[in-house]
Amino acid sequence: MSTSLILACLWALAANVAAILPSGDNHWRRAYVLILLGIPLLGYVTYENGPVIGLLVMLAGMSMLRWPVLYLGRWMRQKLEK
């Protein structure tokens, strides 16, 4: 297993641990940190393993951070309707 995939697995483990711990702001601060760490990691995974594996890792990350993705989609749809 490549270094980038090991780091992606550690990122997923950190995301699950962050979801388990209680939070006063509905985990948004943790989601921002995970997004900031996940974007360059996704680029590294894609660079090292190819676009198919990168797409799979991106889909896995989106499934864990689904609320920020849903809110982004709603915001984009709202901007396009205006």
Image (cartoon, rainbow, N blue to C red):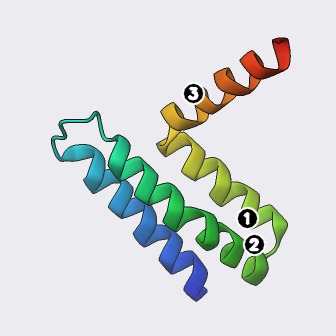
63 vs 38, nearest the viewer: 38
40 vs 53, nearest the viewer: 40
Would you place residue 37 above or below residue 28 in this image? below
Residue 3 placement: quadrant:
bottom right
Q: Nearer the viewer, mark 3 or mark 2?
A: 3
Amino acid type at circle 1 is Gly
Residue drawn at x 34%, y 48% is 29
Residue 10 x %, y % = 41, 71
- In the rendered view, does 61 fall on the left or right side of 80? left
Distance from the alpha carbon under mark 3 to that under mark 2: 25 Å
Residue 59 x %, y % = 65, 48
Q: Quadrant of the N terminus?
A: bottom right
Residue 33 x %, y % = 42, 59
Q: In the current view of this chain or complex, which residue is farthest to the top? A: 81
Q: Residues within 10 Å of mark 2 (few under 14, many from 20)?
A: many
Element type at mark 1: helix
Indicate which disc, 3 or 1, sits on the residue closer to the N terminus.
Answer: 1
Q: Tag on residue 64?
A: none
Would you place residue 70 above or below residue 78 in this image? below
Residue behind mark 2: 46
Amino acid type at circle 3 is Tyr
Indicate which disc, 3 or 2, sits on the residue closer to the N terminus.
Answer: 2
Element type at mark 2: helix
